[in-house]
Amino acid sequence: MISLASNRSKSFGLLPLLTAAGIVGNGIRIRMRLRRLPVLEPSTEPVGPAHRFLTAAGVRLDDATRRAASAHAARRGLQVLDLIPDGLPAETILELLRRYNPATFRSDPFAPARSASHAILADADVLERAGIGQFEMLEPTELAGIALRLKQYAGTSTDAALVPGLSALPDHSNVQRAWIRAVTDQPASAAELLTTFAGPPLTFAALVFGCAMANPVCGALAVLAFGLQPLLTSAGSGSITADISVRGVIGRTWRRPKVWAGAVREQSAAARSELLEQIEERRPAYETELAAGTQRFFEARRETCPWCGAADLSVRLVTADLLQHKPGRFTLEECRSCRHVFQNPRLSLAGLEFYYRDFYDGLGGPVTEQGFSLTKGTYLDRARMALPFTTPKSWLDVGTGHGHFCTAAREVWPQTVFDGLDRADAIEEAERRHWIRRGYRGMFPGFADEMAGRYDVVSMFHYLEHTREPFIELDAAAAALTPGGHLLIELPNPESSFGRLLGRWWMPWLQPQHQHMIRPDNLIRALTDRGFTTVAVHRGEANQRGSDLTWGLVLAVNAITYDPKLPWLPQTRLRNSPMFRAAQLALLAAAFPVVLVAWIADSVCHQVVRHTGGGNAYRVLARKERGTGVA
């Protein structure tokens, strides 16, 4: 018994030691980032005619600082430059550099924009396209949001620099709140969210537990490391100072989690209030539409397969809208002859408008765009697939959304001109951001004549399964391509074993949006019929990490923890009661570690699938043969 207790004490004592090592390592990492920050140098050149300065209330930029900033931006080809006071406290610098990496920030168009929320230089053209009209007396939270927006309009020409002599705002709590707002508004990976929001409470718990319950000596070392982290980050860095008093070092242990908890609570309340306002604005329109019933959202059930015409059909899946929870039941049927899976009855045009609304735009727009911003590696894999086969001058991405693929693909194809097509107003935003050269808004077949023979590559990434008539879409692609041009398509794979294992909880079924789930052999046959030669097929390489177990669990949790105030849901006293919401939050907290385990399992499966084939998605690259026409 004594031996068991001793082993347990040693195990528990290891926790604060590991915590201390992590704190020191993170401090060194941030210190290296601080050393990479460029410092403005004096300049006698006048401020560039296109340069404008945005400043927070209480911040004054003298002429020397403006000239130095303008010269720095011109010399480095920057359109946006965040100006960081070198007098910021070490605590603020530490938080600023947790997610801002000077070595990679500029080259990554999707990197989260982090601002010191004091002053920003920006080109007039960028400000105009971003719709920024107020330049002075801004709140730090406003500057944080502006920095995020400007990064979208100057993705690889945005950076930051330290400004010698620029006075920092006295109220750093405002800067901290601005940073919290930026974190909640910006895309973040699971690891970033964990370190951002769970990091301080977990650190606090580890330190307290180590001191009080396990090994006081190891716990004391962890407390000391945590308290001295700002000093480790900033020592020898000019005027950046840290509170190294006994009170400052020890007090940081409980002060930092308290500051974080308060800032997160404040931001969450503000975001919730804004969301509820948008919900109530939309509620009357949804209530009016739903009063007429949902029958008009569906066409008559068809008796034959839309792919091969056979009449031998069976039900594959019946499910509901598991993401938005809009009313309706949706059926996927499978043709026993060609094994094509399709929605039957399919949505009418009115149904498509109803179920797509507030998903890619409106209420769901910010979350959807954040998701698209986290998959840069996938975008690069897609772009590289064409490398051995062509050097395109012009590329059309169909279903491009905001143009995330196009702006990422320039890293692979810097000389290629990218255009995009989409039904939503996101396509116009993509054009304003210069993520695409030209945006076409509408249905692809409607532009087929205008685009005839214009593009060397046409891509359709997770687009074809959303369409009503895939054959017509393929005809439009054939028409838009030059002879010898290439068509690149990525689709969910209905042959995935997880599709059968998870049933309605398999995310790629995505009802009611996905109209057709197309098998690879069926797609290749349809391309051959249209004069294409398939030159490459990616199966394991196209597998999307997290789309199986992780998203299956997310869908299951979302079935219970969805927002009961959504404007298309009936309002009841139970759903709006505090106890109902508290129970949802408790379930959400309990599910977090389970989802984390699912993510780890998915990551292992992802590596296996990439080397063995199969998976939840596939890509096909096909060449349009010269002298062939549209079938």
Image (cartoon, rainbow, N blue to C red):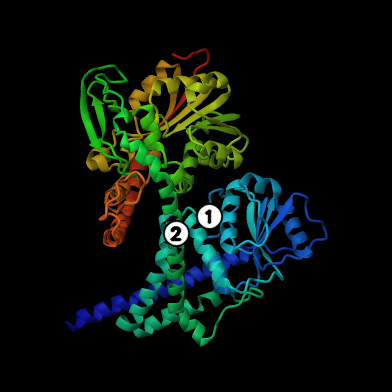
Amino acid type, mark 1: Pro
Assess whether mark 2 and mark 1 are in contact (beta carbons under 8 angstroms): yes
In the displayed structure, does residue 415 sit left or right of residue 298?
A: right
Residue in the foreground of this view, choosing between 222 and 199: 199
Rendered image quadrant of residue 119 = bottom right
Residue 167, percent across and down?
Answer: 68, 71
Amino acid type, mark 2: Glu
- Give the position of the N terminus as an image quadrant: bottom left
Residue 560, percent across and down?
Answer: 27, 52
Residue 37, percent across and down?
Answer: 63, 63
Residue 534 showing in the rendered view: yes
Q: Is residue 188 above or below residue 250?
A: above
Residue at 53% x, 70% y: name it: 28
Residue 192: which numbered mark, if any?
A: 2
Q: Secondary structure at mark 2?
A: helix
- The CA distance from mark 1 to mark 2 is 11 Å
Q: Residue furthest bottom?
A: 246
Residue in the foreground of this view, choosing between 65 and 105: 65
Residue at 42% x, 75% y: name it: 20
Count of numbered labels shown in the rendering: 2
Decide: few, some or many residues near mark 1? Use Cα within 10 Å; few <14, some 14-19, many ≥20. many
Q: Is residue 61 above or below residue 476?
A: below
Q: Is residue 374 above or below residue 263?
A: above
Residue 332, percent across and down?
Answer: 26, 31
Q: Which residue is mark 1?
A: 112
Compare marks 1 and 2 and give the one earlier in the sequence. 1
Q: Secondary structure at mark 1?
A: loop
Residue at 25% x, 17% y: name it: 310
